[in-house]
Image: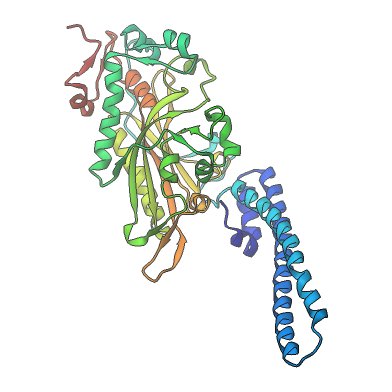
Amino acid sequence: MFDINLIRENPDLVRQNIERRKDPEKLKMLDQVLKNDVEWRKLKKQVDDLKCERNKISESINQQKKQGKDISGLLNKAKDIPGQVKDIEEKQEQLWKKVKLGLMQLPNMMHESVPYGKDDSENVEVKKHGTPKKYDFPLKSHAEIAEQLGLADFDRSTKVAGVGFYYLKNELALLNQALIRFAIDFLVKKGYTYVEPPLMLKRDAYEGVVSLSDFENVMYKAEGEDYYMIATAEHPLGAMYWNETIPEEQLPIKFVGYSMCFRKEIGTHSVDEKGLFRTHQFNKVEQFIFCKPEDSWKLHEELQKNAEELFTALELPWRAVNICTGDLGSIAAKKYDLEVWMPRQEKYREIGSNSNCTDYQARRLNVKCLDKHGNRRFLHTLNNTAIATSRAMVAILENYQNKDGTVTVPKVLVPYMNGIKVIGEKK
């Protein structure tokens, strides 16, 4: 949620931020927030003036009563004030709801290092690791490999659940679990606390981490109940300290959370229609941090380093990109995407993202930190995809495929695969 004080004190700075994002609708929203806030403050002054008048009348009543004077006129005036205050406060409350709704929909202030651009084609590469392998045989898609080796059944999953789901079998199911355990162990060793969060959240809690008006179209809701299936572990991890104040000596709090995730979106391109790249249900290991505001940019780089080290250990070619203004979501102040080379498509595809949400999410959640002097302030939140296993499996199946149709297991995962080094090898 946006800070109303920043809008009041420096509306031009906020306007410039929205203009850089190329979002004219949000500019209109800013104008409406400013208008409603001016009206709200006028009403607040009226209420304050009426309360001040009531106090003065009370003093006059006491003085004139002592002097034996007639106080009936003053009593009538005092009697009218509570009703006037109530009427104005009701108008105030309705106006503030409109202001708050606008604050929850205005985009976060971007960091100065976010590059300007209209869409994802103008994201800026900041780092690259590894060299894509050259193949001397026709490449197969991950779906072809999985089906031919009996590792997945997409047709039967479509029969029972529809497009966007899958059955994993044999070594591919083990590979999914291996990636989960590898990422968890890696981050636990770095001091992150492992958490398995709820797979459903109430609406109020969900509104704390995202704007449901923007996100609801990709989420599943339990019919007739106040529950949403989570779209990522980031959301229940972020909501964990909803309406709480955390002593600063406990910060930073670093979580690694594993969950299944559920989203309505699926692929629209032929390469995605069958397979694992974009599905309704997937597994993800997520990093999440609560920290003091002055530490968040250092920790943003730490999260990025963690993700890069994971995919370096998997020996997959990757690149990191700084997301441009036109492609940056409303909650993040800055975001990196990690993209892995997909040889059949001959391009890098997103495998995870890393966002510093500064105090934007914390304001929505009302999560603050408390210093040793008793001062409270909103803390900062950050989130990063450690590994989304389905996309990692796509990358492994395609990058590690062999001419004989088998797939080599990345060395770092062999211990998690019961010693299996090659998938599909005849025994």
In the rendering, at what x and y percent does residue 94 appear?
A: 70, 53
Locate the C terminus and report the quarter of the image it occupies. Answer: top left
In the rendering, at what x and y percent does residue 326 appear?
A: 58, 40
**Does 167 appear above or below 110?**
above
In the rendering, at what x and y percent does residue 101 appear?
A: 64, 48
**Does 67 appear above or below 411?**
below
In the rendering, at what x and y percent does residue 136 appear?
A: 32, 12
Residue placed most toward the observer, 137 or 269: 269
Q: In which quarter of the view is residue 249 placed?
A: bottom left
Residue placed most toward the observer, 260 or 27: 260
Residue placed at 37% from the left, 37% from the top? 197
**Does 3 appear above or below 335?**
below
Residue 250 seen in the figure: yes
Please, which colouring scheme is shown? rainbow
Query: Going by the image, does 194 lie left or right of 125?
Result: left
Query: Going by the image, does 28 lie left or right of 299?
Result: right
Q: In which quarter of the view is residue 308 placed?
A: top left
Q: In which quarter of the view is residue 143 placed?
A: top left
Residue placed at 35% from the left, 27% from the top? 389
Residue placed most toward the observer, 122 or 87: 87
Residue 134 seen in the figure: no
